[in-house]
Image (spheres, helix red, strand yellow):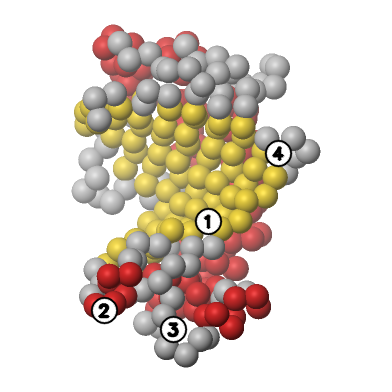
Amino acid sequence: MTPYASLSDDFYINMNLATEMELPGQRETILHFFECVQKKYPTMRKFYCRDKRDFVLEEEKDQGRYRWAAVESKRLCSGQVNPPSLDAVLDQHRLVLELAPALLSISPLDCEALDLMFGFDFAFTGNHNALLAEALGVGPAMDRVAEMPGGRVINYEPSLTISLDEDCRVQVRVSTETRTNAFQVRTGEFAEEQLSVYVTARQYGSLDPHMTYVEALDRLALLAREVVDTCVVEQILRPLARAIALK
């Protein structure tokens, strides 16, 4: 189990490589790429085309833990939901990036952005926005607004992006996503939906000379883990889990 498995209902790590040029879409190229992925992970047997140009290979989802990979028109993606270990999911992302230059003709020059996202989902029936405001607070500048008589929070999704180099090419974003709308707040009718917390480490632009996509990924993984461990677990995830448990 990963060290983050107990922090939320679902945990996942996704890798996305956005390219400047369109990726190959020929039948032989796509099938050969996914066959190479499947050779390493033979349980990835479900292959399908989504939106005419997006090709996906994934495991069955009925166990609540599965791998997936996708080739879109200008994006290469890989992910794993509830991975058994951090090494397991990062090895999957490394494999996809190792195959990409030769099989999909992706050059280190052809990088619009490479990002690694740690995602945490909490199942909650109720007003996600109000729950976030209660668990995390809204900050001194917004306290008076949140406390207005008769007021109900209908939109609150705090996020923060910081740059970690002078050129603003390496960035980290901590963000939240709620799935409650004004109609649900008005009627008081809520379905159980996922409230998400994301930590995304991203590098923009072509890679430095002699750097591979795998090396860039490993650097982003170290950065993302540092942010999760020092800035998110105790400050966001545990308070959110406690607030849900009290409801």
Q: Which residue is mark 3?
A: 151
On the image, numbered disc 2 is attached to which residue?
A: 188
**Amino acid identity at mark 1:** Ser
Q: Secondary structure at mark 3?
A: loop
> Label 4, on which residue?
168
Q: Earlier in the sequence, mark 4 or mark 1?
A: 4
Query: Mark 2 to mark 3: distance in Å?
Result: 15 Å
In the rendered image, the residue lying farthest to the bottom is 149
Residue located at (54% from left, 37% from top): 115
* 235 sits left or right of 193 in the view: right
Q: Which mark is residue 40?
A: none
Cα–Cα gap, marks 4 and 1: 18 Å
In primary-sequence order, the first of circles 2 and 4 is: 4
Residue 112 picture quarter: top right
**Residue 5 in picture, x, y percent from top left:** 44, 57
- The amino acid at mark 3 is Gly
Which mark is first along the chain, 4 or 3?
Answer: 3
Residue hosting label 1: 175
Q: Amino acid at mark 4?
A: Cys
Q: Secondary structure at mark 1?
A: strand
Identify the residue at image location x=53%, y=40%: 116
Few, some or many residues within 10 Å of mark 4 (<14, 14–19, 20+): few
What kind of element bears circle 2? loop
Between discs 2 and 3, the one toward the N terminus: 3
